[in-house]
Amino acid sequence: MSFRRQMIHRSSASRTAINSRLQLSKGIKHRNDSRKCISSSIRQYCIILALGVVIGGVSNSTYMEYKIIDGKHLQTLDAKPGSGLRKNKTIVDVQPDEDHHNAVSHTSDDLKRTDNEKYIGEESKDNKNDTPNEINDEINSDLKNVKNVTNRVDVDNPDATAEDVNGSKINITDMKNAQVEVSAEEELIVGFQLLRTQSIPTTLTPDIMKTNFLSDHLKKRILVTGGAGFVGSHLVDKLMMEGHEVIVLDNFFTGQKRNIEHWIYHPNFSYIVHDVINPILLEVDQIYHLACPASPPHYQYNPIKTVKTSTQGTLNMLGLAKRVNARMLLASTSEIYGDPLQHPQSETYWGNVNTIGPRSCYDEGKRVAETMMYAFQGQEDVDVRVARIFNTFGPRMHPNDGRVVSNFIIQALQGLELTVYGDGKQSRSFQYVADLVEGLYSLMNGNYSLPINLGNPEEYTVERFANHIRNITKSKSEVKFLEASRDDPHQRKPDISTAKEKIQWEPRVSVDTGLELTIEYFQTVLKEQGKIVPTGSSASKPKNFS
């Protein structure tokens, strides 16, 4: 009987766990550069370790048999009733070596159990309380025993035999193969541990982000609605790096999975595809409510849905906050000021809004959302925060959101005309997304509960800004003036004195620095997509770039 089959008969939980992992590793092609390419093998790392260690060493109610089918799929052949695992369910794709295929392709008849035998992944009853760390210690001890056997025999003799830790005879050729696999298993452990401490580099988020470790009494479970969107995904980065547990709730109308894919395998991260206009039951400590289309073409595409998202969606989140006693922050907007008659705009200004215009679905929806926030604070004692966000830009902006920054950059990079709606004399203030995230975080964790403006007071006319981007990108594009959009504000500039005083916040990143990073991002998107058609001022459904 081969070494691998002998391992099936071991009775302790740790030996069962290592057997599962060795059994699985037969189906993995051992690459010499695997230590350098963790991201390319990351799915295999996670699932193999979860099957081999967690199921094998922790669960007392689960046992499975594995086989490779069609040369590349790892499949369960059986599962104990009540374990939640379905029969013949494909677990993970693997790339087996041809030499190893037959050694792993066991049928259920090959691995039938006697009273003294155990299935791969089954835990012994006397070790059912072992922690994952204790099991890993035992596994590492077994790995050393495997190596020690090969050190005590003539490994150059393919017919030589040795005794394993149980006294069973083992063929040295099998032992040498197993020793190579032990090295692969050690790399899997390293990969698994790495996933607990950082993000995975991706095409659009190549920088690795390290995560803090927080003890349970400091770690919060935080819900971010709209967390796969532009601002939401950057906020998720901040919260993950702080060491908190983050749940993203998004229906992916304007959000994109690629904005959060670098956290998919981190144990502190999870996401739920869900629309906030429907209630949801969760247990959380804080709620950042960002869900709602924010660019005019997108929120005008379905104005009724926009109103429902701002009203019914906010009502649902407030109900959740009340039930679990969570603090809730609403991402409101500078649009509640409408086309302002006061300049710059302070939080005490009540606004100048057309309640029946094309932008009113968003403007009035956010105004009602603010009303509900403070109604719940006064009547139900819900702890609330409100951020009035001014124009924001940065990486992960939706390429077709039709906003000034994204449109100008995309047009300039492709040599297209830069389209300005109106005479270009209307003014805007632009803040970089990293500054906004710091403001949201400070507001949530501060003691000030009234609305706060978050924006950059540096003001540009739209025409000046178009020429500025053209100069930065060294584009030869011309500026083209088109008919003004209806109800487009003539001026927009935040008074951030309250933010400075109450939460000690002000923007740190200059507009030029932010533009350089944003232009670099859109260059990557264009290289990937080949061509992007800018969105005009009229209502438009978001295009999927995932």
Image (tube, helix red, strand yellow):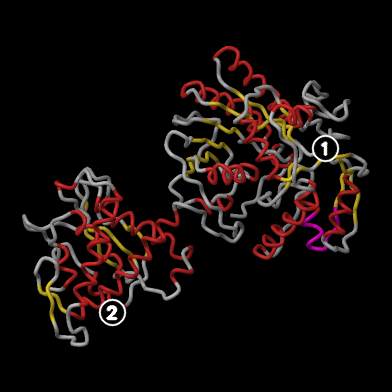
The alpha-carbon separation of the residues under discs 2 and 1 comes to: 66 Å
Circle 1 — which element?
loop
Residue beneath disc 2: 99
N-terminal of the pair, mark 2 or mark 1, is 2
Q: Which mark is residue 139?
A: none
Residue 521 drawn in magenta: no
Residue 415 drawn in magenta: yes
Report the residue that reaches farthest toward the bottom. Answer: 157
The residue located at (34%, 65%) in the rendering is 186
Residue beneath disc 1: 457
Q: Image height check: is 310 above or below 129?
A: above
Circle nearer the viewer, 2 or 1: 1
Q: Amino acid at mark 2?
A: Asp
Where are the magenta residues, as a range?
A: 409-418
Q: Image height check: is 423 above or below 353?
A: below
| Disc 2 packing (10 Å; few <14; some 14–19; many ≥20) | few
Q: Image height check: is 41 above or below 367?
A: below
- Please identify the quadrant where the C terminus is shown: bottom right
Viewer-side residue, 263 vs 404: 263
Does residue 442 appear to the left or right of 197 in the view shown? right
Q: Amino acid at mark 1?
A: Pro
The residue located at (66%, 62%) in the rendering is 529
Does residue 335 appear to the left or right of 424 in the view shown? left
